[in-house]
Image (spheres, helix red, strand yellow):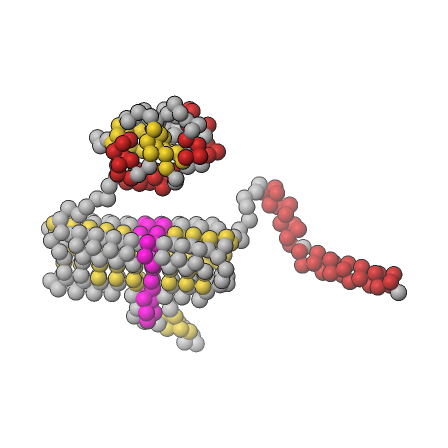
Amino acid sequence: MTSYTLSQIVAELGGEWRGQDIPVTGVRPLDSAGSNHIGFLANPKYKATVGESSAGAIIVNAKVADEFTNRNLIVVSDPYLYFAKVARLFSPVVEANSGIHPTAVIEPSATVPASCEIGAHTYVGANTVLGEGCRILAGAVIEHDCKLGNEVVIHPNAVIYHGCTLGNRVEIHGGSVIGADGFGLAFAGDSWFKIPQTGGVTLHDDVEIGANSMIDRGAMTDTVVGRGTKIDNQVQIGHNCQIGEHTVIAACAGISGSTKIGSYCIIGGAAMFVGHIEIADKTTIGGGTAVTHSIKEPGHYATCYPMQTHKEWARNAVHIRHLSEMSKKIKQLEQDLAALQHTNKA
């Protein structure tokens, strides 16, 4: 079992350790940590849990550190980020186990460096080029004319359609499809004529796509996802969308074609976007929000109602049904009041 002393962790990641230089074997929440674990306090309102915790050491910020003089601590400016880095120490990135499984099918014109790991029942298409240290895991498919950077990971049963480009350290989780046809149709009077989708998908460095998510290829130019952006499970991104750098998109969001979302945005779960709109950098969209027009100014936007009991909802729904009638009455009262004031002045 891997273990690190507090001094070793600080030497690797920075920070200040206080108390005994004990070894720890992993990170755990405060309420379930044992004496061989390190916990973290990210939100000061949960300080009471520190006294109840059996954690051998705790990651805290300097504002509260002096309150825990009887505990072994690592003091840092951002405990949550530091916790993530400590967790990575105990769970390092898996490197490629170089080799090609005998059931894999690799077209002769494909380029697969010896450092790559090619799993069982995988397929690598003609003229596709893989970078160094890629991991193409069981059942994954990479079609023809794709280009992958170094240390790309394609998890089981993910599919990369033809002509897609993935940067370095891109990770695609199981069941996701990158580069399926965009939903482009022209009405021919009595039927729909499919518009050929001749673009591709470009995912820049350090993009991660969760399980069962779909990113459609562009109609004529590529759908693009910027560097460092992280996309959760079951997300749909339509053709020709452009997603900026370091944006995060939570599960079940749906983004219609040709939408542009800026960098450093936060998109909540099940948010929905109409097509052909633009979202400013550093915009936050609340979960379940329907975004129907462009957002030019960054900020926090939400349209969904907070949860309430059914009784409360039913009572409010009665009033919502009569909003138009109530608005007319208010306008009439305003007019009557204005007329009365005018009469009194006269």
Residue 329: where, in percent of width, then height? 74, 58
Split into 4 quadrants, where in the image is the N terminus?
A: top left
Q: Position of residue 80 (x, y in %)?
A: 38, 39
Inspect the magenta stretch and tell me whether residue 39 lies in it.
no
Figure check: 31 above or below 193: above
In this view of the protein, which residue sits in the foreground, 258 or 36? Answer: 36
Front in this rendered view, residue 281 or 99: 281
Instruction: Indicate whether 156 appears above or below 295.
Output: above
- Which of the 4 quarters of the picture holds residue 237? bottom left
The residues colored magenta run: 208-234
The magenta stretch spans residue 224: yes
Say left or right for 138 vs 84. left
177 or 132, which lies in front? 132
Say left or right for 156 vs 97.
right
Q: Residue 214: give x, y in percent of width and height.
A: 34, 57
Looking at the image, which residue is at 29% across and 53% down? 206
Q: Is residue 185 visible?
A: yes
Q: Would you identify the image quadrant in which residue 125 lies?
A: bottom left
Residue 197 seen: no
Give the side of residue 150 with respect to residue 189, left or right. left
Task: State the count of labels.
Answer: 0
Residue at 18% x, 58% y is 130
Q: Residue at x 25, y 58 (%)?
A: 167
